[in-house]
Amino acid sequence: MKKVLLILTGIMLLASVPILVFFLSQRQELRNKAAPATTLTLQPNVSSIPVGETVIWKVIINTAENKVASAKISLIFDQSKFEAQSITNGSLAPRILNQGTVGVGTATITVAAENTTKPIIGQGEIATLRLKAISGSATPVAVQFASDTFVAGIGETTVNVLTSSQPGSVTITGGAQLATAPTTAVSPTPMTSSPTPNPTIKPPENLVAQPASSSALTIMVDAEASRGGKPLIKGTAAAGSTITVVIHATPPQTQVTTADETGIWQLTPTTTLKTGTYTVVVTALNPTTGTTETLSSSFPVGGGIGGAEMTEATGDGLPTSGSTEITLILLCAGSLMITFGGITLAKKYL
């Protein structure tokens, strides 16, 4: 009888150890989640430049305590002062999700970390913009971040961890005749003359912007077991929207894609998901309005259950640290009671 009691006590103590370790690791994971603190800064390589020369602008990221998966860099500038030549990724962002494109007064690129296990961390260059000065200016000319600039975090409390962006500026020397005219004549003229002779251009723009309503973003998850733990996550959004998908797994998975011209987007998890229930949070950044929408959905993996219904996001879908602490305290108390109870019984029958 004594041996049986001692064995049972030992088994209960051993069983409590992995449970305590699990909850301690969960608590530590919650502590590791950081509030958004990432910043972006534009740094021109010169303070002034003559007309006809090229200035190089470095996009510097400082992730602070955040872990960054990807960043959409969208820049705007005075088209009467600069002519965009190229925008490329920097050393801190080795992957390119969307190739750099330059237009009249705009430049955009979406860059990413090597993978989710090697996120972008620290401070450094994630993109480089090259602009040619085409007319002089008596005052510094700024290049700044557009409203659709977006930085996606990995396993953080929110999807977009960007908190602030700092523009840059240079003075363009030379071209004295153009120095006084562009600010008053060049800007208003294209804005009033371009849309008027081309009224047919307006309807397509309006049509593209129409999906940017409260019901534009949708999510559907096909969680059939036959997919081997990689369910198809798909949906709709405004055409051309930047879609950031965060799957709350261990570790969390973050991916960025773009809705096609019809507004359809889809992807699958980067790594196989184990059997269980997961929450996916999807954020769509509308390229026309600069607004964002967020939806979340819970879905099962395994068991051959079909797609989950779409629901509105009510938060970040993360457990609170309070419930973990309470559970941990109860487990510790239970373990102590089992230990002292086993010792008391052992002494009684010895």
Image (spheres, rainbow, N blue to C red):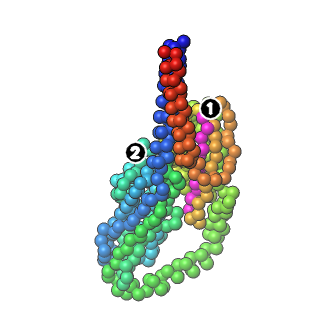
Give the left or right position of residue 15, taking residue 181 as reference. Answer: right
Residue 130 coordinates in the image, percent (x, y): 37, 65
Q: For residue 256: magenta?
A: no
Q: For residue 286: magenta?
A: yes
Q: Is residue 187 above or below residue 285?
A: below
Name the amino acid type tagged 2.
Lys
Residue at 52% across, 50% down: 256
Name the amino acid type tagged 1.
Gly
* Tag count: 2
Quadrant containing the N terminus in the rendered view:
top right
Q: Which residues are magenta?
A: 276-287
Residue 302: give its label: 1
User: Does residue 85 appear in this view?
Assistant: no
Under tag 2, what secondary structure? loop
Under tag 1, what secondary structure? loop
Residue at 64% across, 53% down: 314
Q: How far apart are labels 1 and 2 at the CA level?
A: 28 Å
Residue 118: give its label: 2
Residue 170 coordinates in the image, percent (x, y): 35, 75
Q: Nearer the viewer, residue 78 or 281?
A: 281
Residue 316: give its label: none
The quadrant in which residue 75 appears is: bottom left
Q: Is residue 340 above or below residue 33?
A: above
Q: Is residue 293 above or below residue 10?
A: below
